[in-house]
Image (cartoon, rainbow, N blue to C red):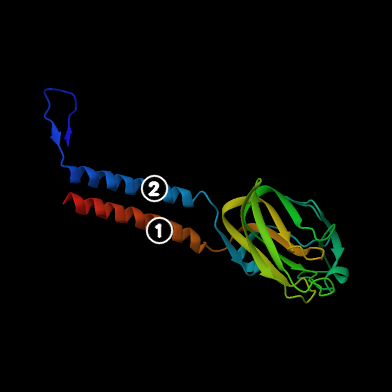
C-alpha cells in the first residue's frame, strides 16, 4: 500500500499490507481497552456490608426522639415502639421507624451524597409471613445504582444488619420486604463512607491496567 502526503518534494512512505493491518489492529485494541475501562467506571459496583463497623458514619439516627434530622428525610415512616413492632428489642433503645402501611418500602431522601449505608431491620413476624428477603437499594436521583438482599431470620427482633457500599455516590435509599405482608421496621440508620477500600475498586483498576499493558506488549512485539 502506498501512502503519499501530497507534497512532491517529500518521499513517499511505503507500508506492506501486513504492517498496515497490524498497526490498525493495535490501535483498535487500544481503543477498545480504553472504552472498556471508561465504561466500568460509569456503572456502580455495590458491596454488601455485614456489620456497622464497616461504615465510617457521618450521620446516624436511632429514632428514639426524632424521625427526620440532618441530611435524611424519611418520607413514609413513623416513630414506633419496639415493644409493638419488634418484641421490645432494637439495637440501641426502645424505638425504631415503621412504614406507614404494608407491604410498603421505606424511602430515605438525602440532601448530601454518600457511598455507604446500613441499618438494622426487624418485625419479621411469623404471624404474617413464612419468610422473605429484605432488599436494600440505593439511587442517584432516579437511577438505581444497585442493591443487596438478606434473608430474614424470622425471630421478630430488629437484630439483623443490612448495608452496602457503592463505588458511586447515592442520595436516596430504599429498603423493602419483597412483598411480605409486614410493616417495614428499621433502627440505627446510618450513612457515610466505607471504612475500608472496596476490593472491586482495585479489581477494576488492575483489570484496566492489565489490558492496556497487554496491548502495549503486543504492539512492541509486532514492531520488532
Of the numbered discs 2 and 1, the one sitting upstream in the chain is: 2
Residue 152's image quarter? bottom right
Nearer to me, 224 or 6: 6
The answer to whether 222 appears left or right of 97 in the picture is left
Residue at x 45%, y 48% (from the top left corner): 38
Quadrant in the picture for residue 83:
bottom right
For the N terminus, give its image quadrant. Answer: top left
Q: Residue at x 58, y 57 (%)?
A: 166
What residue does disc 2 label? 34
Pick the front one: 115 or 212: 212
- Above or below, 11 relative to 118: above
* Percent position of residue 39, x then y: 47, 49
Please report contact status of discs 2 and 1: CB closer than 8 Å, yes or no. Answer: no
Secondary structure under the numbered disc 1 in the rendered image: helix
List x then y, in percent, for residue 119: 71, 64
Report which residue position mark 1 lands on. Answer: 207
Q: Residue at x 25, y 54 (%)?
A: 218
In x, y percent, where is residue 14?
14, 36
Residue 151 vs 202, above or below: the answer is: below
Lateral position of residue 61 relative to residue 51, left or right: right
Q: CA distance from mark 2 to mark 1?
A: 11 Å
Amino acid at each position: 500500500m502506498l501512502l503519499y502526503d501530497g507534497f512532491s518534494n517529500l518521499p513517499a512512505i511505503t507500508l506492506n499490507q501486513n504492517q498496515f493491518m497490524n498497526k490498525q489492529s493495535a490501535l483498535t485494541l487500544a481503543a477498545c481497552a480504553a472504552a472498556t475501562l471508561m465504561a466500568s467506571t460509569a456503572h456502580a459496583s455495590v458491596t454488601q456490608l455485614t456489620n456497622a463497623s464497616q461504615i465510617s458514619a457521618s450521620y446516624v439516627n436511632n429514632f428514639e426522639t426524632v424521625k427526620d434530622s440532618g441530611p435524611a428525610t424519611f418520607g413514609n415512616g413513623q416513630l414506633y415502639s419496639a415493644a409493638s413492632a419488634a418484641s421490645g428489642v432494637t439495637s440501641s433503645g426502645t424505638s425504631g421507624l415503621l412504614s406507614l402501611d404494608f407491604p410498603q418500602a421505606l424511602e430515605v431522601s438525602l440532601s448530601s451524597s454518600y457511598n455507604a449505608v446500613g441499618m438494622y431491620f426487624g418485625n419479621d413476624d411469623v404471624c404474617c409471613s413464612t419468610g422473605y428477603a429484605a432488599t436494600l437499594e440505593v439511587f442517584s436521583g432516579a437511577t438505581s445504582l444497585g442493591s443487596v438482599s438478606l434473608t430474614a431470620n424470622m425471630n421478630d427482633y430488629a437484630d439483623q444488619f443490612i448495608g452496602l457500599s457503592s463505588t458511586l455516590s447515592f442520595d436516596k435509599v430504599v429498603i423493602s420486604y419483597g412483598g411480605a405482608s409486614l410493616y417495614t421496621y428499621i433502627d440505627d440508620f446510618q450513612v457515610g463512607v466505607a471504612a475500608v477500600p472496596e476490593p472491586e475498586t482495585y479489581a477494576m483498576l488492575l483489570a484496566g491496567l492489565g489490558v492496556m499493558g497487554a496491548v502495549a506488549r503486543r504492539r512492541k512485539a509486532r514492531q520488532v
